Image: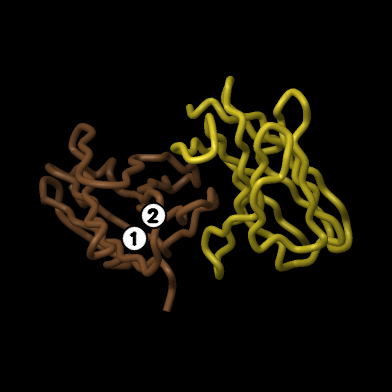
Chain colours: A yellow, B brown
Amino acid sequence: DSGVTQTPKHLITATGQRVTLRCSPRSGDLSVYWYQQSLDQGLQFLIQYYNGEERAKGNILERFSAQQFPDLHSELNLSSLELGDSALYFCASSPGLLNEQFFGPGTRLTVL
Amino acid sequence: KNEVEQSPQNLTAQEGEFITINCSYSVGISALHWLQQHPGGGIVSLFMLSSGKKKHGRLIATINIQEKHSSLHITASHPRDSAVYICAVSHKGAQKLVFGQGTRLTINP
């Protein structure tokens, strides 16, 4: 158990819908990272927050947004969902900016 | 060409064999990470290294910064080592990870 929690574990929804994925980092960790793992693209970095502020952005679609709250938990919002958004979404946390990252169990999103 | 290349893509071995997985990268990095992904999907961080060698139990990771190459070794392999091993790098001055495609390791009893 890494200490990073993600909810829900599984999510099944329809095209066009909007979902919110939630991540609670390890106690004391200030950085939160979001990653997408799809069958054809492998693992890809989406976005990073550090102590409430966006620090780095990867290949995140405009339909996706994220935020980190004062209690340091983070949410990833996916809207206007498409079939191709079906993937595993991982959250990871680290104490600071250049530390080892600890991964949550992931949320498996299926868009039908 | 991917920024992070792993080899082999698939590896099958017998229990007890010495395993080596290789990772090459093409840009300057601040650190290299080795991750293990279990069949259930969970990802575990094995090592983060920026120079030299690290050892944890039966796992050893080495990195050669000049040659932009890292290896992950598993000694006395066991069926429970069966997983996908992923190499990832973080660029200098950046925090995001760039991932290799992974090596699927199967250890047969």
Task: Give the labeled residue for mark 2.
Answer: B86
Whether residue A75 sits left or right of residue B34 in the image: it is: right
Relative image position of residue B93 (x, y in whole percent)? 50, 51
Task: Give the labeled residue for mark 1.
Answer: B103
Which tag, 2 or 1, sits closer to the chain's start? 2
Q: Look at the numbered disc 2 and give the secondary structure of its residue.
A: strand
Q: Which of A26 and A16 is in front in this view?
A: A26
Q: Distance between the residues labelled 2 and 1?
A: 6 Å
Residue at the spot 48% in from the left edge and 38% down from the top edge: A101
Q: Residue B4: which quarter of the image? A: bottom left
Q: Residue A92: which quarter of the image? A: top right
Amino acid marked by disc 2: Ile
Q: Look at the numbered disc 1 and give the secondary structure of its residue.
A: strand
- Badge 1 sits on which subunit? B
Relative image position of residue A62 (x, y in whole percent)? 80, 62
Can you tell which mark lies on residue A65?
A: none
Amino acid marked by disc 1: Thr
Mark 1 neighbour class, 10 Å CA radius: few under 14, some 14 to 19, many 20 or more:
many
